Image: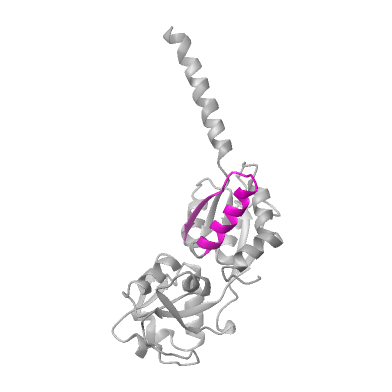
Amino acid sequence: MVRFLRPLLALMLFFGATAHAADRGPLVLAAASMQEALNAAADDWAARGHPRPLLSFAGSSALARQILAGSPADLFISADQTWMDSVEKAGFVARGSRATWAGNRLVLIAPAKSAVRLAIAPRFPLARAIGDGRLAMADPDSVPAGRYGKAALARLGVWGAVEPRVARADNVRAALALVESGAAPLGIVYATDARASRLVRVVALFPAGSHPPIRYPIARLARSTHGDAEPFRRFLLSARGRGIIARYGFTAP
């Protein structure tokens, strides 16, 4: 009886696991700044009768390294072209699936109750405004938001003065959290991050020409076998998908 039931149980487990996999949506690895917008898009997609996509958010650098290490996923949304380039050059992007989905702006933020006032211009007194505190940024050596921020500060001639005072965060939302908690008097994040928080206020908007254009590429990964991966990618790139993220402050690419 045991010998008879053992293969039957194995078959039941196999078909159960297959059914469970079919019930879940595609796994999407996305830049941390996309949380609210992409969750709204996933909800809209699920409301149309599809399994809701599984969303995993982190810094684009961390997500790209996961993909390069062989972690399974279906779609990748990066906050810059550089990390998508790395994934594509390594052969992990499905041919013809890469597209630019959205854009963003870079802002200087402070805690909501802060009285600091600054106008962003060449040689503006950012180091003086930081004082004995720290400037919260995503890691400028690897994370896109930090790279954009470093580029802007270098172009404006203040990077050298503030670099020793930078609090390097794992991703842009971690930088936002430092300012929200008051652990940092100022921070650099995307405009959409500031918009998502009631605990910070925008001090100033960085001039668009002070840093490379902020672009979010999206691609289906070559190893993806999920039937909804490509349809969900196309939905995000459709007028409806772009309209959803526009409500959260993302710009046209």
Residue 165 image position (x, y, % from top left): 34, 80
Q: Is 152 or 235 nearer to us in this picture? A: 235
172 on left or right of 99: left
Q: Residue furthest left?
A: 132
Residue at 47% of width from left, 9% of height from top? 4
Rendered view: 104 above or below 205: above
Q: Quadrant of the C terminus?
A: bottom right
Q: In this view, does 11 lie above or below 138?
A: above
Q: Is residue 180 magenta?
A: no
Vertical arrangement, residue 166 with respect to residue 73, above or below:
below
Q: Position of residue 9 (x, y in %)?
A: 47, 18
Residue 131 appears at what percent x and percent y?
Answer: 31, 87
Q: Does the magenta stretch include residue 43?
A: yes
The answer to whether any part of residue 100 appears in the image is: no
Q: Which stretch appears magenta? A: 34-58
Residue 191 appears in the rendering: yes
